Image (cartoon, helix red, strand yellow):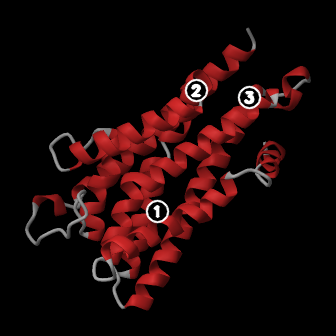
Amino acid sequence: MVNYLKSEFLKQRHRFNLKLLWLSPFIAVTLVLILMGGRFFMEGAFNWWYTMILPGTLSMIVSFTVSAEKKHNRHGLFAVSTSKIKLWISQLVMNTILLLITNLIFFIVMSTVGTTLGVSIPFLSSFIASFVLFLTLAWQIPLFMFISEKMGSFFSLMISLFCNMGFGIFFAATRLWYVPFAIPARLMCPIIKVLPNGLPLEAGNHLGDSSVIFIGIIITVALYFIFSLITTMWFHHREVK
């Protein structure tokens, strides 16, 4: 399995995905500096990050990975004796690691710029928020790998943006916050004290209830493993027909 994973990372060396890991955090930070200035930099950076830029980045990374494999007919690996299950799982794991890396890069860039501007969310809260975003968005990886395989990169990206920006923002502040696409925005309320619309969370607001954090993480982590299992079995059986 280690060799499969090494192979997946080697194939990323000359693809746009690795550039996206760095480019996306800088885009988020630059947009906030231009549009919002320095006073609400941290709140704005996180809001732009988890409502639009991070879901879009994740969808592009997943879609580009799948489309490249399809374009090259998976490098002829199906013509030799190889584990199709391991091929799919290695791509799942690689995309999951890339999601973690881009969140860490965002955290470092945002914290550095915020400290320079003299405005910051507490360091620990920022780190926890970045890691929670990784946990609550990872479930989309197997889902959009499947959609990319079935419908192509364009539809995968459009569905991702529609669901994350539509369902995510609309349901996050309601009783239906547990809709999976809305969980990241809902959990940011008690962690970094920012509402889904980017405004600071007022003291006493019910959205500051931290009990949702554990529930939201459990739901999304469970979905990650469920979708990973389902799509792995689908990929294996589809290819051996």
Q: Residue at x 40, y 43 (%)?
A: 220
Mark number for residue 70? 3
Mark number for residue 231? 2
Mark number for residue 141? none
Measuring from the top left, give residue 38's x and y in whole percent: 33, 82
Relative side of 130 to 196, left or right? right
Q: Nearer the viewer, residue 125 or 39?
A: 39
Label 1 element class? helix
Residue 144 versus residue 94 in the image, above or below: above
Label 3 element class? helix
Query: What is the three-letter code of the residue carrying label 3?
Result: Lys
Mark 2 or 1 closer to N-term?
1
Relative side of 157 to 23, left or right? left
Label 2 element class? helix
Quadrant location, the N terminus: top right
Q: Residue lying furthest top in this view?
A: 241
The residue where tag 1 is placed is: 131
Mark 3 or 2 closer to N-term?
3
- Answer whether labels 3 and 1 touch (C-beta < 8 Å): no
Residue 126 versus residue 9 in the image, above or below: below
- Answer whether labels 3 and 2 touch (C-beta < 8 Å): no
Quadrant location, the C terminus: top right
Q: Residue lying furthest left in this view?
A: 204
